[in-house]
Image: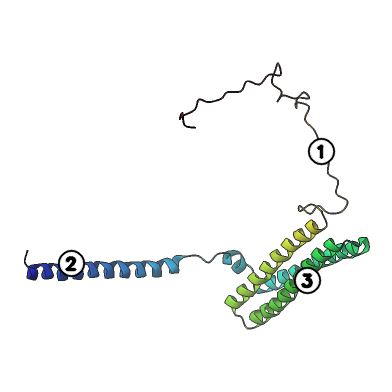
Amino acid sequence: MSKRSFWQWMAVSVLVLGGVRMGVARAQTANNATTQEQRPVVGTRTVQQLTPQQQLRSASRTVEEMQVTRRSVSTMLDRANQERDIIKVNCLNDKLTQIDVAIRSAREHVDLLQTAVSVSNDNQRNHEYSLVLIYQQRVRGLDVEARQCVGEEAAGFGEGTEIGVRVSTTIPTEDVDLVPGGLIEVYVPPTLSPAR
């Protein structure tokens, strides 16, 4: 093969390879554009099914629920202060501060939700409502964490709830893990190498 034919072959290869790469890149770009148009937005279906007034009522109830949680954590903090348990006090103070921030942010987004409803901006309205629901979930998580601070169960059973345990009669009473005869036979595998 002469030098000239070698360079011609290289030029043709580079052009073909470059053309293939351009075709693949264009195909991927076109594929991404159609995929993005068809991709559903997560969580918007339930938000969009509510009317603006339903979203406002739900958001207001959500903030009220968050306030109830705040009062519950505040009560736990008062009990921890009376017990003079500094670890519980510090933990509950932290959770209460985070709850206050979440409530304040949720209230701001409820106000923005009211504004979006008044100007009929559906995208903004759904966005603000979604954020209020996110803050609600955050406060619920902080409530569970606060209960763990004071040693309550994470399940959050309310006060006055009685929990009973029922033991099945089919459970054997003797220890079934004991080996009969009291002897345990030990098997030592053979060595694989005489050097070990």
SS label for mark 1: loop
Q: Along the polypeptide, which appears first: circle 3 or circle 2? A: 2
> How is the rendered protein coloured?
rainbow
Q: Along the polypeptide, which appears first: circle 3 or circle 1? A: 3
Residue 128 percent location from the top left of the image: 64, 75
Query: What residue did someone put label 2 on?
Result: 13
Place residue 167 in its image quadrant.
top right
| Residue under the image location 13 percent in, 67 percent down | 9
Rounded to the nearest angstrom, the CA distance separating label 3 from label 2 is 66 Å
Amino acid at the residue labelled 3: Thr
Q: Farthest residue toward the top?
A: 181
| Number of the label disc, if any, that sits on residue 67 | none
Rounded to the nearest angstrom, the CA distance separating label 3 from label 1 is 37 Å
SS label for mark 3: helix
Residue 126 percent location from the top left of the image: 61, 73
Amino acid at the residue labelled 2: Ser
Of 132 and 83, the residue lying toward us: 83
